[in-house]
Amino acid sequence: MASTASIHKNKKSTLARIKRFLAKDDHFSTSSNQILMKCHNSLHSKIYSATGSVHCSVLRNCSKDQVQAIIANRKSSSHASSFIPVGVNEEFGPTWSTHLFMIKIVIPSDWKEKEVHLRWNSSSEAMLINQDGNVLQGFIPKHRENFVISKCWEPQNNSEELVYYVEMACNGLFGALGEGFSIDPPNPHLNYKLKHVDVAVFEPLIFKLYTDLEVLLGIAEEMADDIRGYQALYTANEMINRITINNDTTGASDIASFFFSEKNGAKAHTLIAMGHCHIDTAWLWTYNETKRKCARSWSSQIRLMEKYPDIVFTCSQIQQFAWMKKDYPGLFQQIKYYVQKGRFIPVGGTWVEMDGLIPDGESFIRQFFYGQKFLEKEFGMKAKEFWLPDTFGYSGQIPQIMKHMGIQRFLTQKISWNRVNKFPHHSFLWEGIDGSTVIAHFPPGDSYEMNGLVKEVLKSVNNSEDKGRTNVGAYLYGLGDGGGGPTAPIIERLQRLQDVDGLPKIIFNGPDYFFNRLESDSHKLCKWVGELYLEMHNGTYTSQARLKWYNRKLEMLLKVVELRTTLDKIDTLLLNESGTTPESTDTQWIEDCWKGLLLNQFHDVIPGSCIEQVVHDALEIYHKAFSQIEEFIFKDSRRRGLRKIDIRDFFKPDSNLVVFNPLPWSRKAVLCIPVTEKPFNIEADSRFQFVQLNDFPSLSSHVSTNFPMWEFGNPSQYLACLSEIQPSGYSRLNPIATANNPVTFSKSNDDLTGSLSNGILRLEMTLKGSPQQKLFLKTSQQDEEWEVFKDFKGTNTEAGHFYIYDDSPACWDAWDCDDYHLETRQDIISYNGSNSGSIEVIAEGPLVGVVKWTTVSNTSDNSGNRLNITNYIVMKAESALLEYITVVDWEHQCHKFLKVEFPVNVHAREATYEVQYGHVKRSTHSNTSWDMAQFEVSGHKWVDISQPDRGVSIINDSKYGFQIKENVIKLSLLRSPKAPDENCDMHQHVIRYGLLPHIGSFQSASTIRNAYEFNSNFDIYSYEMANVSGDIKRHLPCNVIATSHEAVIPEVVKLANDAPDNTVCIRLYESFGSSPSNVVIKLRFPARKVVECDGMENLLAGNSALIPISEQELIDEHGVATRYFSFQTDFSPFQIRSFLIFM
Ligand SMILES: [Zn+2]
């Protein structure tokens, strides 16, 4: 059946006619003429032909936790009377409150065999629940306002009453923004109006015509110069003629069907359409609201699957499945049913869609580990792809970690947000820093929230950088970020477009089908090597400093807990004595702590781009984990006969002190042990030095718990001593009488400069006026020195000074620091006024020397805000690390960015940054647009700039933002964005970092070990011999694991997950970027069998070979014999390897 062209060859008026015919809400405007006018009897208004009223009542302000209980109690006499009748136009609030509605419906008898819908619009998100308390569907204003009560109504009797409940949540898809979209903090005082509730008869044919015309209009507009565009235009025009002249809806429908039946050629580009609903696990709303968003969104998807048998729905973030299982078990069963059908498809395999830069390597592994374990247990399947549409950067270690977790396919989208350089591929091979390669795809429509529009499917072809190399692309459709997912109109539009001449083909299918097709073209794809740097959102390395502090600490601590738990297991094997068995072997709490840490690594939480309430929720999760760990360590040490250190024990002749070192190498170091008072007669004992950090702040506002007390992290008084400490485990703490290289302090004759020296470093400082630091590293036995700080490139940087920048990003406040902020740099001294502060020497050695520089603002800025900084510079005996502790009063800053900067005497074109289980190099210049865009980059515990013979590393505690350009290292300390959390970082901060100048490479200078040591903590105990029976050495095991090569770091020692009870999993990685061979991995626990496994702790496919084990018995100075087991293996650069040890 052919359509007839319009009589007048006026394309503009024909397009306007179609638009007017399709106008919603009876209002219409053309794009060329913005005047709104009412158009009566639009087609849209006829989709529903008859309406009926409902009886609606409400229980205001009920807590969301009560909803299920109230519905369960529906048969009680008080139930109905607690609901008050309510009508449309009533308002409900405030923001975040919950109101439960009861809706009673009697459907008119003359609606027999009609499709009957319930319609609802409360200007907010809402959830429809049946009388059994089961979730039926979500409601979203404008997007999902109807629920299908029946496709074909068959009344049981005339007065049959249907009862539903609606849980109204006083927030929108994007939290509490009021009208429109903004990232401002939520408005706590919003009200939401009940705009509409009724029942109505749905007319399927009118809806079909409406959708047909919508799609034809899209083709006519988007393919305006193409023959198919004209054909679509005239088809739509003819349809309107038929409907207008004699209401020939059937004839109009046939014309449309004919157009859509004209098929594509065999070579048409194909889009694999996957339903998707990217629900941010928290962002402009809390974790608790996300649970409801999942229930609303996913129940709606199940209703759509019932209606449309072809569609599939992809769903990431396993935490959200776990929430459904707990909070909505009925819905979870329905999800399970469709998972088994292969239509509700869990994707990604990670616990949440985490930030791609800040979590450490082991966190990445656990994201997959706990996610995939859940999928295996609940659904008997595992995700085959890593699914991370939305994240703020992509570590170069992701390919190897994916492969270690058994995944070879990667899908993301965010890199399309790049501000400077368009990423050159959509389908490509991604090679990580170790050489591992995975196949990667960025949906070329540049969105994970497609709406079934013609312009989107055309963009998905035209924008693809790899068309021709591959004929396939992914198309992710459905409302996202705030939830929602696909809607019926989106699916209807896509159905029209499945195979239409002139447009790409669309196939409804899942990621497995898509990647299978893409993989068949993999030999034609290009390769990208190294990290995928996102040229946006680089302020997220710094925003919400407190979350980042807790994240780093918990990452370190959970590994300590796992090591200790493993030691307990080894004890029970080695010792059969009573009283040594651990009190409980329950490790579920450790898994729960991991899951809390992983949850907070969600890509709007750990980056610091969430609202204040989410920050509070995240802190609560951290606090709970910290207190559980504290309790565990307390009990664990008690069981071993250890007690909290009493400082007097140091001075008893037969003092017995032990120290627990979680790191797998021995150290000789100055320990600074927090004490509450100055020990009596301390001066007489040359083994110790008492250190008091004057005016050190109380950090109760920063850390809610006293545990763990990181060195120089909380109290202001310390007892310093030098000691040698054994690796991974306990060793006796024997303070050494004198240091080989004690710290000394001297002043110039005129008192203007002072010098701290430890025989390795010499720090010269001005003692009056503007503080200037000069640092020298001893380079030879002949006392030759290298001057470390030098502004030899004229950058106008004073070493160790603080610089403040104006930080007003163009659009994404907590996310972005734009390049122009670099033009607003001010030394803190000029920013604070003329007062450069005071300098005071507060410790002169021999173990610790401390210089304190205080800069107090004597003027305020235009807003009346002052900024005070106290900086403690710490030099320790026998150490090449110069430590800094910076206390910043940051309560009043607004759109400012604080950095500390060091011009170093190193000429290098590249700098090195630690990332997950490895490091990357980035340029120190801005030659190309790609170099230029990297003006603020992320790193982990250390960064380094080196020339072949020497260099400088900076290590840090819980900082992630850096810039190393020219020869200046800038460490980003604090930001002060105002949206979406107006109180972001508005408190006092204590920041630790250290400077490690070195001769030779950073590898030979042990930068990596120094960074671990700076971020880990000792636990020191006293013990009484009387309390410790038997073999003290075995009760307090040390040397549990060690390697023969410094490059290979054993990061994890844990009990294996699903293996026999006495199996230990260890994970090691090569940290230098080198290829050490015959590395001996030495274990101090019985190893019957060693096999290599993947990160899921499954034997490596095709490699079940047993690794030969050597056994050796060593007798220590106490005459105690210990058996050591070892095996040898090789490592390639940055290789991550896991082994199962069967004891
Ligand atoms: Zn997101």
Image (cartoon, helix red, strand yellow):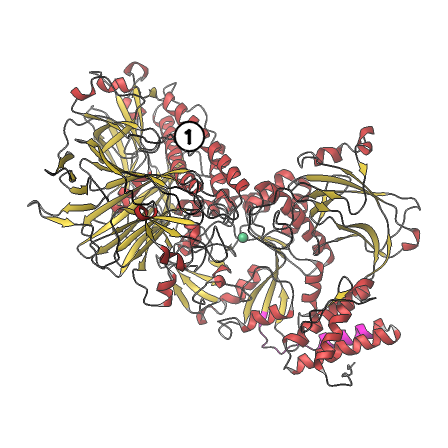
Residue 102 lies, in percent from the top left, at 79, 40
**Would residue 1133 be visible to someone looking at this image?**
no
Q: Position of residue 763 (x, y in %)?
A: 18, 42
In the rendered image, residue 668, in percent from the top left (x then y), is placed at: 21, 34
Residue receiving disc 1: 700
- In the image as oriented, which residue stretches furthest toward the left? 782
Give me the residue at 35% from left, 24% from top. 575
Helix, strand or loop at mark 1:
loop
What amino acid is found at the position of numbered circle 1 in the picture?
Ser
At 28% across and 40% down in the image, what residue appears? Answer: 837
Vertical side of 265 occupied by 576: above or below: above
Expressed as whole percent of the image width and height from the top left, the position of residue 1119 reads: 20, 24
In which quadrant is the N terminus drawn? Answer: bottom right
Q: Nearer the viewer, residue 520 or 797?
A: 797
Give the left or right position of residue 195, taking residue 549 as reference.
right
Corner quadrant of residue 424: bottom left
Residue 167 magenta: no
Give whichever of 703, 133 is nearer the camera. Answer: 703
Instruction: Give the total number of marks visible in the rendering.
Output: 1
**Which stretch is magenta?**
251-270
Return the residue nearer the eye: 7 or 664: 7
502 left or right of 199 in image: left
Q: Please report the residue visible at 66 percent of the width from the left and 69 percent of the height from the top.
A: 498
Crowding near pointer 1: few (<14 within 10 Å), some, many (20+)?
few
Rendered-image quadrant of the C terminus: top left
Q: Quadrant of residue 851?
A: top left
| Magenta stretch contains residue 265 | yes
Let me know if residue 821 appears in the view: yes
- Nearest the viewer among 480 and 890 is 890
Identify whether 53 is placed above or below 19.
above
